[in-house]
Amino acid sequence: MTNPVPLREGLFRETAAGPTLLASCCTACGHTSYPPAPRCLDCGREAQEPVELGSDGELLCATVVHMGNHRYPPGYTVGYVTMPHGVRVFAQLAISAGEDLPAPGTPMTLEIVPMWREQEQDVLAYRFVPAPGKESAHA
Ligand SMILES: [Zn+2]
């Protein structure tokens, strides 16, 4: 048994309060980038500081992908989730095949799970799970 490896360093981490996405915030103009960028995607300056987005967001839109790939069979769900700082994150959604898609505006919560295996190791990545009872952190 080997330890799972992250998809890529610096994208997410587990904290005592739950999983969080790691982004960068421009100290010049306040624009937040995810994944973190070495220079601001808005103003181009290099003054970036790390910021944690937390795990709570709100669904912007979702769709079912009917073409499989080497990691996922056909019928998986992807979507955009709006996170704090106005960041939109594209990710897989934890929706079973045949289940109704959650409506835009549904509160979503981040989950870090082994998503596939590569070279006999589980690869950790993130996806969003509908959390309808939860108050969205995004106002
Ligand atoms: Zn900027």
Image (cartoon, rainbow, N blue to C red):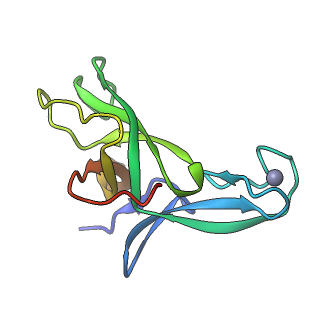
Mark yes or no: residue 40 visible: yes
Q: Residue furthest right?
A: 45
Q: Residue at x 31, y 60 (%)?
A: 135
Q: Residue furthest front?
A: 139
Left or right: 44 as drawn, with respect to 58 = right
Q: Residue furthest top?
A: 66
Closest to the observer, 105 or 34: 105
Q: Residue at x 31, y 17 (%)?
A: 67
> Count the marks: how many?
0
Left or right: 74 as drawn, with respect to 29 = left
87 lies above or below 70: below
List x then y, in percent, for residue 2: 30, 67
94 lies above or below 11: above
Closest to the observer, 15 or 54: 54
Q: Residue furthest left?
A: 98
Mark yes or no: residue 120 visible: no
List x then y, in percent, for residue 21: 49, 60
Left or right: 125 as drawn, with respect to 37 = left
Instruction: Look at the image and tell me in which quarter the N terminus lies.
Output: bottom left
Left or right: 132 as drawn, with respect to 139 = left
List x then y, in percent, for residue 22: 56, 62
List x then y, in percent, for residue 61: 39, 31
Q: Residue at x 24, y 23 (%)?
A: 74
55 lies above or below 17: above
Closest to the observer, 133 or 73: 133
